[in-house]
Image (cartoon, rainbow, N blue to C red):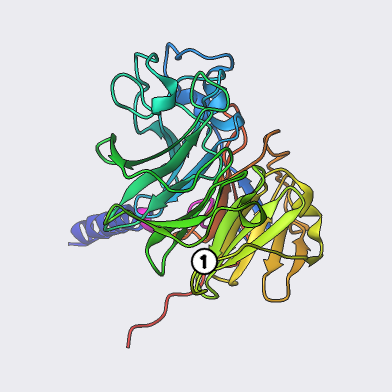
Amino acid sequence: MRQYRYRFLILLVFWAGVFAAPLQAGPIDDLKPGHWYEIPNSTMRQVAPAPTPAGDDGPSAVVSEVSGGAYDSKRDLFIVWGGGDTAYGGNEVYAFDIKTLKWTRLTDPSKDLGGYANSGYYPDGQPRSRHTYDMIEYIPPPVDRFCSFGAANLYPVRAATVGNTDCLDIDKGKWKRMKNTLSYGIGGLSAYDPVTKRAFVHGAMSGGYLVSFDAAKDQWYVHGRSDIEDGFIEDDLNAAIDPNRRLFVAIGAGKAYVWKMNARGFVKAESIKTTGDNGILNTKSPGFAYDPVIKKFVAWSGGSDIYILDIVKRRWTKRPAAKTNKVSPGPPAIRGTFSRFRYVPSKNVYIIYNDIDANVFVYRLTNKPKAKKKK
């Protein structure tokens, strides 16, 4: 009898370990505030197509050629897409899975890179490779699509721009053409607003103005007007939205702009002055995101320090890494971070990617909020 009881206890311990294993925290979950983590063996080069499509720089241009990223909060995927100009013709879309800590390709590159560049499409109907800047976003369910708003420097023509809007079905890897954006240009801005469930977009250079896109209805709405005073936005900025205060904010190139999203009629860009540790404004397209926990903006442009913007006080605060932190993501990409610095809601961390041959880095600013008890 004792023998059977002993065997039963062994089995009980074994199965308890099996079922408990998925609940064990991983390196990202264990990350303490003020610390960075470099994800081992996480270079995007590993999943680049072979042979690689034409271009002066190859698939490295997907990151280096002023390209952005978006975060799919449903699947926990960090999506990166770019290229264009004469640098790279491949139009494949990459995704880093925060659960498996691995890269995959959501689409394969088009085989025929010919056709008319200014159409925005290759002969197979897929969107052409382009500089994506800060013009790509993930639109959550019920839309559940990765979308690109306008196109600049389409392969293989420098300075070619079009207003094409295209949205990708992430599960099927299929693109769908939507109505053209009304505001675009070289270096446009975009950010998703969870309140209206629209993507807000602002074209760069002269002629840009604020518009929003309801992907569910495939409908664009105008919130601004095109003129030099409001419309000339540099191509070295990144944007994010404060959903509580209803503000669309952009920083970079020595500037900071605010658009009041609840304003009646046309919305004018307000150029604001900020105080504190505001040196980050002078960097090229710094990473910029809204933190829903502290309800402030967070920015990064190299090294282990991050910067917090209190938009009410219009004051920056530099937050050095914790004294026990031993990891740094290094310098940003030479031409800017754009939207490759993203907040990860499921983990309450930030994810950053700088180079196709570098690893992915994550950073924790605060402890993950405790779940509210159901009444």
Q: Amino acid at mark 1?
A: Phe
Choose top left, top right, bottom left or bottom right for residue 113: top left
Q: Which residues are magenta?
A: 22-30
**x%, y% of residue 85?**
55, 23
Q: Which residue is mark 1?
A: 266
Rendered view: 62 above or below 13: above
Neighbor class of circle 1 (other Cα within 10 Å; few <14, some 14-19, many 20+) is some
Depth check: give the residue in front, 160 or 349: 160
Residue 93 shown left or right of residue 272 in the figure: left
Local SS, label 1: loop
Q: Residue 101: in sight, yes or no?
A: no
Residue at (35%, 50%) from the top-left corner?
75
Rendered view: 364 above or below 327: below
Q: Is residue 26 magenta?
A: yes
Seen as rendered, the residue at the extreme bottom is 375
Q: Residue 202: in sight, yes or no?
A: yes
